[in-house]
Structures are given as structure tokens and as C-alpha cells.
Image (cartoon, rainbow, N blue to C red):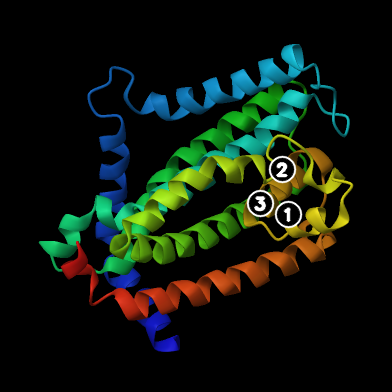
């Protein structure tokens, strides 16, 4: 597996310029033909956030303050990273099929295709982070020193779902059933990851501990530690341990899938 890992790293270094160009092209294609263009990358998640905020604040009337912050601010700190993770869960799984022409018609390294999707989604995510910071400031909450660790959580998120993209993209390329399963379970993942509720407040111990191994929960909690709870990353050693465990497992799965399937992918597509 070490040989496979070195091969993937070398391919990314060699094709780094093409990756950036293809990522930009992927972002442009998503909103091509619309008047507002890339602004939809911000408008769409903003509408979703507004709907959840309205429903919980006025409909279900559960939008009380959390940790001294308005529920709306608590909500967006979980929703903003979720938009990236959601797009990578489904987009990562379908990336090789989406760019199959790079595999079948051009001699292009398969391992770098998930990176195209990941970089494209990360560009949108960074824009949403900036808007989130401005929203906090408009509510009177200025950034604290804890924001310095935000790039760490963002990098953790990027690393995990980049690796997920390699694993799921390879498997989905040879099995459309796996791709359909991932897409079907994406919405379930949202409700089981503590995006709109506090996973750490679940009373059932074994469910709470299991959820804290969910990378989506770990990242969402990390973002809230930055903006809401003001907790340093080293003050949550259990979360770091859990992330290392699940990331190591995902990395092993990705390397094994890539090593076994890379030669068969062109024929399967």
C-alpha cells in the first residue's frame, strides 16, 4: 500500500496545474447558462439555511439560544461544512463516472479525478466561510483567537473526503449499485450526524459514542468549537483520536481499492 500511496502523491504533484484548471472548469460548468452564475453557489445553501432556521425558530419553536449564541448562528456553523461534505459524499462517489472521458479517451491518472471535485467544492466552501464570519460579526460576535485553528478543521475535512472520493469513486466506477446506495444514504447521513442538533447531548451513551466516530459529526463539532464554544483542538483529544482512527481506515480502503481496480476502470466504463 505504501507503493500505491507514493504513486498517488506523485500523480498529484505531476498534474497539479491541470488539477487547478479542471477544478475551475468544474465550478464554471455547474452554473453555466444562469444569469447569476457562480452566485448560486452561495444562494442555494443560504435558502436551505433560511428554511431550517425558520422551521426551528417559528415552526417547531426549538430555536432557543445554545451556549449563549442565537440558534441561527449555531445552525450555520454546522450547515456550512455540511454543504461541502454532502457534495463530496455523493460527488466523490460519482466523480470517475462524471469524468470518464479522462479515463477512456485521455491517459489521465484516475487518482487525481476526485481532487477535481474536492477543489471545486472547497472554493465554494471558503466563500461560505467568509460569509459566515461576516454574519457572526453582524450579530456582534467578533472572531476570537480560536479562529486560527479553523484551517486545521478544514484541512481535516478536505483530507478525509478526498480519500473518500478515491475509495467511493473507484468502487462506484465498477458498481453503479454502490453509487445509488451512497446517494440514497446521503440524506440519512445528514440526520444522523448532529448537524441540526447537539450530538454530544444525546442521552444514550452508546449512540453518542458511535456518533463521535462519524467524521461529519467530528468536523461539524470542530467548527462549532471554533465559533461557538471557543475550545482549542487539543482540548478535544477524544475527537482527534476518533478522527485519526476513521481516517486511517478510510485511507487503507482507498489505497486497496485504487491498487486493485485502477487497471480495470477503463474497461468497466
Select label 2 or label 3 by which is in front.
2
First of labels 2, 1 by sequence position: 2
**Horizontal and vertical percent position of residue 58:** 74, 11
**Horizontal and vertical percent position of residue 29:** 26, 36
Q: Are marks 2 and 1 in contact (CB under 8 Å)?
A: yes
Examine the rendered structure and indicate whether residue 145 appears above or below residue 93.
above
Task: Give the numbered dot on residue 219.
Answer: 3
The residue depicted at 31 percent of the width and 49 percent of the height is 23
Residue 194 vs residue 129, the one in the foreground: 194
Q: What is the secondary structure assignment of the residue under circle 2?
A: loop
Badge 2 local density, few (<14 within 10 Å), some, or many (20+)?
many
Residue 164 vs residue 116, the one in the foreground: 164
**How far apart are the alpha carbons under marks 1 and 3?**
12 Å
Q: What is the secondary structure assignment of the residue under circle 1?
A: helix
Residue 31 vs residue 93, the one in the foreground: 93
Q: Which residue is mark 2?
A: 194
Task: Give the numbered dot on residue 211.
Answer: 1
Amino acid at each position: 500500500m505504501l507503493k500505491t500511496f507514493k504513486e498517488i502523491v506523485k500523480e498529484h504533484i505531476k498534474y497539479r496545474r491541470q488539477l487547478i484548471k479542471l477544478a475551475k472548469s468544474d465550478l464554471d460548468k455547474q452554473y453555466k447558462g444562469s444569469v447569476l452564475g457562480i452566485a448560486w453557489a452561495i444562494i442555494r445553501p443560504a435558502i436551505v439555511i433560511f428554511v431550517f432556521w425558520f422551521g426551528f425558530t417559528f415552526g417547531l419553536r426549538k430555536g432557543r439560544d445554545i451556549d449563549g449564541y442565537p440558534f441561527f448562528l449555531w445552525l450555520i456553523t454546522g450547515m456550512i461544512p455540511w454543504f461541502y461534505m454532502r457534495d463530496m459524499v455523493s460527488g466523490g462517489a460519482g466523480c470517475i463516472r462524471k469524468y470518464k472521458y479522462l479515463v477512456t479517451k485521455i491517459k489521465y491518472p484516475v487518482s487525481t479525478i476526485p481532487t477535481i471535485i474536492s477543489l471545486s467544492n472547497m472554493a465554494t466552501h471558503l466563500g461560505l466561510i467568509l460569509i459566515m464570519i461576516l454574519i457572526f460579526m453582524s450579530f456582534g460576535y467578533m472572531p476570537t483567537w480560536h479562529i486560527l485553528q479553523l484551517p486545521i478543521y478544514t484541512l481535516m475535512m478536505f483530507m478525509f473526503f478526498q480519500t473518500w472520493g478515491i475509495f467511493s469513486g473507484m468502487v462506484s466506477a465498477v458498481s453503479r449499485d454502490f453509487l445509488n446506495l451512497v446517494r440514497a444514504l446521503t440524506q440519512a447521513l445528514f440526520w444522523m450526524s448532529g448537524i441540526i442538533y447537539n450530538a454530544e447531548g444525546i442521552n444514550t451513551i452508546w449512540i453518542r459514542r458511535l456518533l463521535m466516530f462519524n467524521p461529519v459529526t467530528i468536523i461539524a463539532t470542530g467548527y462549532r468549537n471554533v465559533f461557538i464554544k471557543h475550545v482549542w483542538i487539543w482540548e478535544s483529544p477524544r475527537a482527534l483520536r476518533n478522527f485519526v482512527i476513521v481516517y486511517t481506515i478510510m485511507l487503507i480502503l482507498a489505497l486497496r481499492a485504487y491498487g486493485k481496480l485502477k487497471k480495470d476502470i477503463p474497461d468497466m466504463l
